[in-house]
Image (tube, coloured by chain):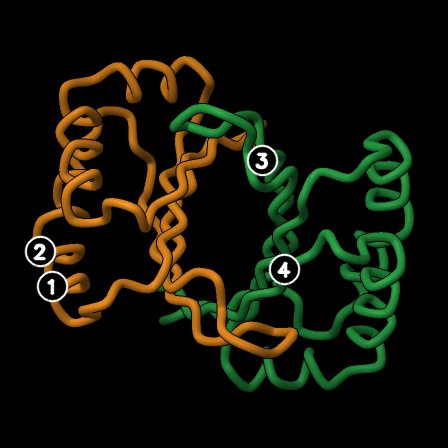
Chain colours: A green, B orange
C-alpha cells in the first residue's frame, strides 16, 4: 500500500530559536489538526553528507493513508490555516513537495 | 527514541527510465545491504505543491535506530559501495543530508 506524503523542506531561518519556537508551538499543532493525517514526522537536518552547508534546516513529512485522504486533507480548512501560517513564518524558506511512497 | 536518517534527494535525470532501472535494480539493492539499515523508503515526487517544476524527482530515506548504528553504517564497505554507485549514476543530481527525527 503506498503512502501519500507532503514534504515541507525548510531552508535555515535567520532566527533559529524564534523559528523553532513558532514551529513547535504554533505550526506543528496546526498541521496535526489536518483531517486524515496519519503522522507528522519532523526531521532536523544535522549535516550535509557531502560537505558544505546543508541546503535545508528541517524536513517535515505529513503522511496519509490514501490518495483520497491526501486530497481531502489538502482541501480542508485546517490545511489552509496551516499553509497560511507557513507562508508567514517561513516565507521564502519553504518548498512543498507531494510524494507517493512504497 | 529518535531515528537517524540519511536523505538522498535526487534532481530529475535526463533519462528517467534508465535512472529508475538502475535505481531499482542496482542502487536500492546495494543500499539494502548496508549493515544496521532499518528500512529504505523511496518517495517518488509527483508535484511541487506551490506550482512549477519540483526541484527533486525522488527522495530516498535510509532509517537507522541509533546514532551508533548510523555511524557504523556510514563507515561500512557496503555504504562506500552504495555511495560510489550514486556518484556514478546520479552524478550532479544527488544531495545527501543527515537528519535526526523524533
Q: Are marks 2 and 3 on the same chain?
A: yes
Question: Element type at marker 1?
Answer: helix
Q: Chain letter for mark 1, please.
A: B
Instruction: Say whether disc 3 or disc 1 marks the residue closer to the N-terminus.
Output: 1
Give the number of the mark in front: 2 or 3.
Answer: 2
What residue does disc 4 label? A95
**Image quarter (top left, top right, bottom left or bottom right) of the N terminus of chain B:** top right
Residue A15 appears in the rendering:
yes
The residue nearer to you, when weighing B56 against A21, is B56
Residue drawn at the location 76% of the way across and 70% of the way down: A34
Mark seen at residue B25: 2
What residue does disc 1 label? B21
Marks 1/2 in contact by CB < 8 Å: the verdict is yes
On screen, B80 above or below B37?
above
Mark seen at residue B101: 3
Give the number of the mark in front: 4 or 2.
Answer: 4
Q: Position of residue A82 (x, y in %)?
A: 82, 66
Amino acid at each position: 500500500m503506498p503512502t501519500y506524503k507532503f514534504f515541507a523542506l525548510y531552508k535555515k531561518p535567520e532566527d533559529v530559536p524564534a523559528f523553532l519556537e513558532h514551529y513547535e508551538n504554533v505550526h506543528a499543532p496546526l498541521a496535526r489538526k489536518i483531517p486524515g493525517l496519519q503522522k507528522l514526522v519532523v526531521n532536523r537536518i544535522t549535516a550535509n553528507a557531502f560537505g558544505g552547508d546543508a541546503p535545508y534546516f528541517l524536513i517535515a513529512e505529513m503522511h496519509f493513508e490514501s490518495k483520497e485522504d491526501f486530497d481531502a486533507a489538502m482541501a480542508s480548512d485546517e490545511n489552509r490555516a496551516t499553509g497560511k501560517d507557513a507562508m508567514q513564518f517561513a516565507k521564502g524558506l519553504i518548498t512543498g513537495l507531494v510524494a507517493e511512497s512504497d
